[in-house]
Image (cartoon, coloured by chain):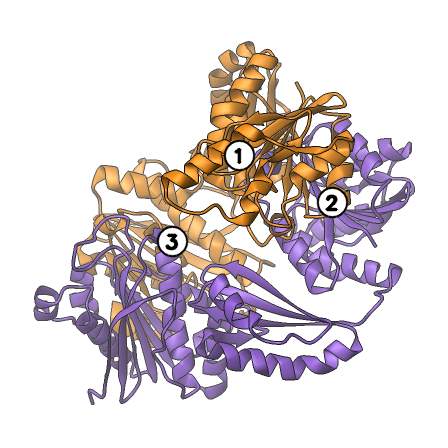
Chain colours: A purple, B orange
Amino acid sequence: MKLEMICTGEEVLSGQIVDTNAAWFADTMMNKGIELQLRTTVGDRMDDLVNLFIERSKHADVILVNGGLGPTTDDLSAEALALALGEELIEDEDWRLHLMELFKKIGRKIPANMMKQCLMPSSAIRVHNSEGTAPGFRAKLNKAWLFFTPGVPIEFKAMVEQEFIPFIEETYRPAQATRLHKLLTLGHGESFLADKLNEMAIPEGITLGYRPSAPHVEIKLFARGDDAIKQLPAFIEEVKNTLGTAVVTQNCPSIAQAVHEMLLKKNLSLSIAESCTGGMLTSQLIEFAGSSSYLQQGLVTYSNQAKQKVLGISAEILDTHGAVSIECAKALALNARALGDNDYALATTGIAGPDGGTDDKPVGTVCIALANRDTCWVQTIQLKNRSRTIVRVMSCAVALDMLRRALLSEEVIVPYSFIPCSDSLVEHPI
Amino acid sequence: MKLEMICTGEEVLSGQIVDTNAAWFADTMMNKGIELQLRTTVGDRMDDLVNLFIERSKHADVILVNGGLGPTTDDLSAEALALALGEELIEDEDWRLHLMELFKKIGRKIPANMMKQCLMPSSAIRVHNSEGTAPGFRAKLNKAWLFFTPGVPIEFKAMVEQEFIPFIEETYRPAQATRLHKLLTLGHGESFLADKLNEMAIPEGITLGYRPSAPHVEIKLFARGDDAIKQLPAFIEEVKNTLGTAVVTQNCPSIAQAVHEMLLKKNLSLSIAESCTGGMLTSQLIEFAGSSSYLQQGLVTYSNQAKQKVLGISAEILDTHGAVSIECAKALALNARALGDNDYALATTGIAGPDGGTDDKPVGTVCIALANRDTCWVQTIQLKNRSRTIVRVMSCAVALDMLRRALLSEEVIVPYSFIPCSDSLVEHPI
């Protein structure tokens, strides 16, 4: 089965927005064992769309088309398909009623142009949109099924998962069973990981893939065929042994989610004090429903005055050691924990840049502390030559990894080849 | 002149890396008044490459091909072009000598596979690479010039600027000048905005585009040709008058950035108290370098206990009105402002869901307060049937919009058709 994608929209073609839908789709299909063959990106011009639909439908078996289903004049997909098919656009009565009911429920008038979304070529089959007002549709042109999806990411993803994947799984039976296992790593580069894994004997039918996406490199172990699937569990264990502390989660997309689940399960509470990470750490946990049951507070004490007033950091620490110091990070964690009498506290303080660095403490110097009721772990990491955003993202990941390791009763401070640690401390202050 | 781009490489096709070259190229050409017509992304398979070169060369005048010029086995561009042309690959003698001299100068032996880069189809014309060892080349196939460039961004950009642009400027007459103006809107749907703008007379040569991306819909005004460009400023004003308070920024990608710039410029300080937005609001400002000069603190008082201990919210407010109330939001903003004696404070408290709603206060009820030294503005917005993430994202946007309006001395609380306001309050508590 030859799969292609067509992305529509001037803003995607002109590079004004990054096409996250395209990357997500290729990755999602890859996880199902289906490779994307070709992707074409085209603007909002009728002739280009019609010609492209006709041309690609002679080569591909399935073409996922993204975008152009909305109510405005630059949404041309349905009309372009009708021209390519040589058909009329007709109104989908069911969807019209669906929309009328939807707007009635929320007590709002239907905007005049909304009904444009109910139009599709006469041979097209409507595809349900569970998240928005524009339905998708699919139609056969030449040898290909063209499957039209909305551009809004949340609507697009839902439609791919709920409608597109079942459709191709039903229409094109996979030749072989496949299984995918994902290992998330932190703190090591793709070549470092590949060098280690290249020394291993990889069972036939299993392939390794790497997907770097800051702060992680995800390793995908893909097994194709029953024999390979049988050998997968033992191979996973071998890979984990080879990589040691580099692996942080399995089949879980973030350390934040792993920590969230552990805190809930163990019924433990957490307090956070942030400086350079600036709310990002707290926000990563509050993203998950139920976080209110363990997260007491996340105090972004950004200024020195806030550190003193809100978390009682002494003038002595700030004057002698500075806000970015092992001592300050330790005090932030201890005081944040004590303030809510919580089981754990995390603290970050550092120089995210691009300015504010010194010879002693260059941009990218970040001190991270974890405290529980009897121990405090602190380390200073050096994130040289990284952007402000990456310094913050990496610092959050290291902080959450320290907490994750503590919750698993593992060594809390471990070496990361990509994130040098310049100083560390383990104390039992109480 | 019809310009297309072909991007090669599995890692680009599979979305493992973001294709920054493609976005940069489209933008660079747009600045020259030349629109990219189509972009095709293809993996490292010989047949796909050959077929694509042949097919696209029947449609385009110029095709910029990016990637696949390196020395490894998955660099197939030169060979694929030779097959498409029906020609032999021959070695470019001059470039071989150039490379030998280059390596002699740095005192290193030439790697064995390096000489592969000197091979190109017999009719191809070599294009200089000022930054690397792989030369580019161009050749005519069917009606198109195919122009091959290296994938390494620094080499690619240098070759486009030094070689590609001069080539097309010499070969094709300059196209029409173009200009783009962007208006960011908040709180209204794409169809609501389109309905309003469709009533206007749009000058010839100007097109309107909409890009919804939560929490905003961006409106793009695109002018093509000198006449349209001349009329653009007056038309922008007309659009702004028509949309009124819906427009929140111009040619600026977020309210956070607009607020950041205003606070810096006006030398005003800010304190933040968050509950349901959970650090997202603070993090959006700390994203910008220099935010430390105005942002005192961002206190995520997630639990009631934290609201009491850290921000002194009285038990009476929490017991009588609840944590999600106009009264609590007001107290959070007033106390956060007082704590650091700041010029402004923002506060959010709400029910992000999916659980925790009641009949009185359903999921999506969010109270947002802004305080300065003599006034406090509070409103309760209702974000029904939105995901936890969208409730948080929209709440941050409304909070920042209130501050933005205050900084501009505009009405602070305005109606948003997509975000019903169920209650509001303006007080002068001091």
Mark 1 falls within which chain? B
Tell me the residue at 21%/48% (across/down).
B293
Say which residue label 2 marks: B46
Query: CA–CA distance between discs 2 and 3?
Result: 39 Å
Query: Does B261 appear above or below A221?
Result: above
Tell me the residue at 48%/26% (across/down).
B161
Mark 3 falls within which chain? A
Nearer to us: label 2 or label 3: 2
- In the image, B284: left or right of B40? left
- Pointer 1 and pointer 2: residues touching (CB < 8 Å)? no
Q: Are marks 1 and 2 on the same chain?
A: yes
Say which residue label 3 marks: A389
Query: Does B59 appear above or below A412?
Result: above
Tell me the residue at 42%/79% (across/down).
A404
x and y percentages locating residue A313 in the rendered image:
16, 70
- SS for dot 1: helix
- Pointer 1 and pointer 3: residues touching (CB < 8 Å)? no
- In the image, B426: left or right of A90? left
* Picture quadrant where residue B314 is located: bottom left
Tell me the residue at 66%/32% (across/down).
B90
Q: Residues within 10 Å of mark 1 (few under 14, many from 20)?
A: some
Q: Is residue B417 visible?
A: no
Lower position in the chain sequence, tag 1 or tag 2: 2
- SS for dot 2: helix
Nearer to us: label 1 or label 3: 1
Q: Quadrant of the N terminus of chain B?
A: top right
* Picture quadrant where residue B276 is located: bottom left
x and y percentages locating residue A391 in the rendered image:
35, 58
